[in-house]
Amino acid sequence: MNAIMQSNTSPKISGSVPGSILSVRSLSRAFGGVQALNNVNLEIKRGTIAGLIGPNGSGKTTLFQCVSGIDRVATGQILFNNEEILGLRPYAIYQRGLARTFQISRVFPQLTVLENLIVATRRHDKISISRAQDLLEQVHLQDYGNILGTNLSYGQQKLIEFLRVLMNEPSLILLDEPAAGVNPTLRTTLWEMVRHLNDLGVSFLIIEHNMSVIADLCEQVSVLAEGQIIATGTFQAIRENEQVQTAYFGTSS
């Protein structure tokens, strides 16, 4: 069997592949005359860290928008834990255990750090406060709870956004360039936390342009180009794939 799977040739099925936490089937999304996603098929195995890479404008964030419910106009099928979620509102998907972060930090500037975490639960009770304080302690920000979000550095804001999605203890987290603009110390903290959570059973799908991070973290890597998944496999197989090289550099070796 080839190490690279051409995902768009997979047949459409009504249920998830055994062992998958996320199944994307024949997903398409157009903006006017532009086909942002074209018949995308993708499987994310439960308990793994998977990577999603591709040139700028290839449709990576659009895919995240569709899976997380922000964009409900797409056609196709998205199964999370073998349940159809395409068309559900973002908070309904979040409540089911699928969370995501954004390329650009989205903290609430006039809320404290603690309030920025608690708001994700829509509760202000002892349980939510205790969990928020515990998460802050895990990343050594326990002394920042009463600081306004606007007074944090950009890297700290991105870390707080990551902690916020953890408030509901999700089983799958979509990370959209989580380390962009983050200093090396905070990046190390972030990736250590991703590994720790994965050891506890949390699955991840990560958009990341740093190929050393993808190589180090991800068991499976999928490549999106011009709205289509052109290859899926190990990082080593992906790196040697001529179609991937052409998509990135315009030439193959």
Image: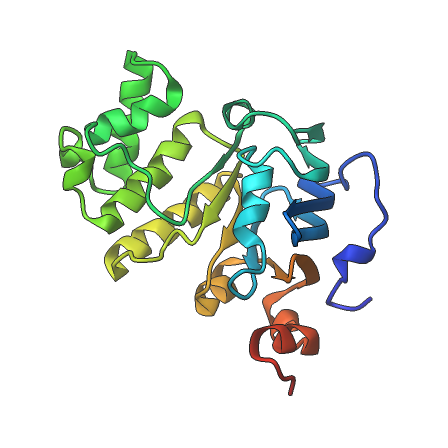
Q: In which quarter of the image is residue 242?
A: bottom right
- Residue 57's x, y, as percent? 54, 60
Q: Which of 151 and 30 is in front in this view?
A: 30
State the residue lying farthest toward the bottom.
253
What x and y, as percent, mark residue 74? 67, 39
Write the residue at 25% across / 59% down: 183
Residue at (53%, 39%) from the top-left corner?
201
Q: Name the spot of residue 7 as percent of width and height, x first.
A: 75, 57
Residue 206 % position (x, y): 50, 52
Q: Quadrant of residue 142?
A: top left
Q: Quadrant of the C terminus?
A: bottom right
Q: Which colouring convention does the figure follow?
A: rainbow
Q: Is residue 224 above or below residue 118?
A: below
Residue depicted at 69% across the width and 74% down the height: 243
Q: Furthest residue to the front?
A: 32
Front residue of 215 and 32? 32
Residue 220 is left or right of residue 101, and the answer is: right
Tally the numbered discs. 0
Q: Is residue 4 left or right of residue 134?
A: right
Location of residue 121 with respect to 165 vertically, above or below? above
**Residue at image point 26% right, 43% down:** 157
| Location of the N terminus (image quadrant) | bottom right
Q: Is residue 187 left or right of residue 153?
A: right
